[in-house]
């Protein structure tokens, strides 16, 4: 274990102890130290009441004072300092009906969610582990403190957090905890979209993003993303696929790099297939138009989960184009770049590679070769700064207005026709040629 604490944390512990109070680092930071990981943050539990904490430190913020939490600012960093407490019954699936401050660190640990998060540490006292958290770390288990059903009825988000910790730590969920999740799954409907999406994002960015499958297996997914739930068991009877839609999505998800936009795009890319399934006379299943349906569902679902607008926009572009065959030629690559933009084109190639890797492996080498060739052309286009957007043209809308064009569609249509020519032959991107062509278009009225 790495038991060395940052100076700021030691200063807070020392100040509280000098004031006559007990104080410990508690929760996830202790777990991380036991696993020889550097904690992302340090929460401090103390017998000091909020008013005492505020009196001891110069800079504090009342971040959750009703529940005993005061943020102490030390060296420009905020540390949550929370009074030992005992919670009353939970009346709304999240907030306790009452909070009682106590002097016993064991009681404070007893109210926490999982044993691996219910330990405390202080350099002189060492690790305080009342519920077997250290042993569960060694056994790589996620296990509730006390009665699992009670923990989940107190705060239903804990069910999703169990899966999240399972994904981020590669731990197994202990049997009684797992059974309680399956029994209490419907309670997740009480949890806000913002809290749910925060946990989903952490699962997606973990080393095990396909643990989203566990949400299906325990019954949570039907209440969080019913559109994705329908994909599990949806058959794909054709020569290109070896998994059902849900399993194909999980394998795709596992194959893309840990980028938020890419992971969401992988999760959403085939989500519309159950609504587009049709069977031909030969028994082969087709999913015509699934990219458009998947895009629509993805946008609606991500808005519902309060995902940020930029991510939704980028995911929509990737899902809409994930099934487009990009031929390894400069015109084809540049046309796709004009639809996606520079950064998203690279992500599209990664998504298409993962998508094809999750299909019948017989066809993968051929598809991978084409995608890699298209990617190399993309790199050449960037290196040579070849034009592929209307904004790259040597003329613009003002130039067309000077030629007698009207504001509006005429200008847009003409600029698009010109960039189509330049995409095929970049040498045509010179002002003299483009103005001449614009005059010809106007005379012929071919807009």
Image (cartoon, grey):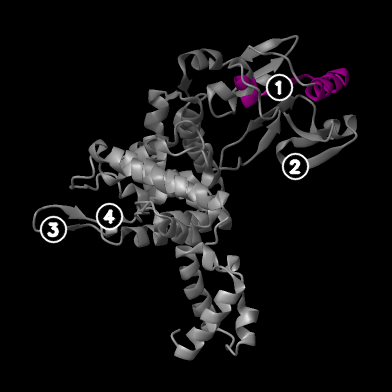
In the rendered structure, the answer to whether residue 246 lies left or right of residue 2 reads left
Label 2 close to label 4 by CB (< 8 Å): no
- Badge 4: how crowded within 10 Å, few (<14), some, or many (20+)? many
Give coordinates of residue 90: x percent, y percent: 56, 40
Residue depth check, mark 1 versus mark 3: number of the one nearer the observer: 3
1 or 4: mark nearer the eye: 4
Question: As drawn, is 127 to the left or to the right of 175?
Answer: right
Reply above or below: 390 against 227.
below
Q: Residues within 10 Å of mark 3 (few under 14, many from 20)?
A: few
- Give the labeled residue for mark 1: 25
Image quadrant holding the C terminus, namely: bottom left
For the record, the magenta segment spans 7-32
Is residue 25 found inside the magenta-colored segment of the image?
yes
Find residue 63 and name its label: 2
Dot placed on the residue nearer the N-terminal end, 2 or 4: 2
* Element class at badge 3: loop
Distance of label 3 from label 4 (alpha carbons): 15 Å
Image depth: mark 3 or mark 4 in front? 3
Per the image, the residue denoted by label 4 is 274
Q: Quadrant of residue 243?
A: top left
Mark 2 residue element:
strand
Disc 4, SS: helix
> Could you say where residue 133 lies in the image, as x and y percent from the top left?
54, 17
Q: Is residue 136 left or right of residue 327?
A: right
Q: Tell me, yes or no, whether the two marked residues, 1 and 3, touch with CB atoms within 8 Å.
A: no
């Amino acid at each position: 274990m790495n038991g060395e604490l940052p100076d700021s944390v030691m200063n807070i512990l020392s100040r509280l102890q000098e004031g006559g109070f007990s104080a410990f680092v508690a929760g996830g930071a202790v777990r991380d130290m036991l696993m020889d990981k550097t904690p992302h943050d340090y929460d401090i539990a103390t017998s000091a009441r909020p008013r005492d904490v505020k009196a001891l430190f110069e800079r504090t913020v009342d971040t959750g004072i009703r529940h005993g939490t005061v943020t102490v600012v030390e060296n420009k960093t905020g540390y949550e300092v929370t009074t030992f407490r005992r919670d009353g019954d939970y009346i709304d699936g999240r907030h306790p009906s009452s909070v009682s401050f106590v002097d016993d660190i064991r009681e404070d640990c007893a109210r926490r969610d999982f044993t691996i998060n219910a330990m405390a540490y202080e350099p002189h006292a060492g690790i305080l582990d009342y519920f077997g958290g250290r042993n569960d770390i060694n056994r790589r288990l996620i296990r509730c403190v006390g009665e699992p059903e009670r923990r989940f009825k107190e705060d239903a988000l804990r069910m999703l957090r169990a899966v999240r910790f399972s994904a981020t730590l590669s731990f197994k969920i202990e049997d009684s905890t797992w059974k309680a999740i399956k029994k209490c799954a419907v309670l997740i409907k009480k949890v806000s979209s913002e809290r749910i999406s925060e946990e989903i994002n952490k699962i997606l960015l973990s080393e095990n993003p396909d643990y989203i499958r566990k949400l299906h297996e325990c019954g949570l997914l039907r209440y969080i993303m019913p559109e994705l739930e329908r994909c599990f068991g949806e058959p794909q009877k054709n020569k290109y696929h070896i998994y059902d839609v849900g399993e194909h999505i999980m394998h795709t998800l596992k194959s893309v790099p840990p980028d938020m936009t890419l992971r969401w795009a992988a999760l959403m890319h085939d989500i519309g297939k159950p609504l587009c399934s049709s069977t031909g006379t030969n028994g082969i299943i087709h999913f015509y138009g699934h990219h458009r349906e998947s895009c629509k569902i993805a946008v609606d679902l991500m808005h519902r989960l309060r995902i940020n607008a930029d991510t939704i926009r980028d995911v929509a572009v990737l899902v809409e184009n994930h099934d487009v065959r990009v031929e390894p030629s400069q015109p084809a690559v540049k046309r796709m770049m004009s639809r996606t933009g520079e950064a998203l084109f690279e992500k599209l190639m990664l998504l298409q590679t993962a998508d094809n890797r999750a299909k019948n492996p017989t066809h993968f080498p051929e598809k991978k070769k084409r995608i890699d060739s298209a990617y190399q052309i993309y790199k050449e286009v960037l290196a040579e700064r070849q034009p592929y957007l209307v904004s790259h043209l040597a003329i613009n809308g003002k130039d067309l207005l000077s030629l007698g064009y009207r504001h509006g569609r005429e200008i847009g249509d003409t600029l698009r026709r010109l960039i189509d020519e330049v995409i095929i032959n970049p040498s045509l991107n010179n002002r003299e040629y483009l103005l001449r062509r614009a005059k010809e278009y106007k005379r012929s009225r071919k807009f």
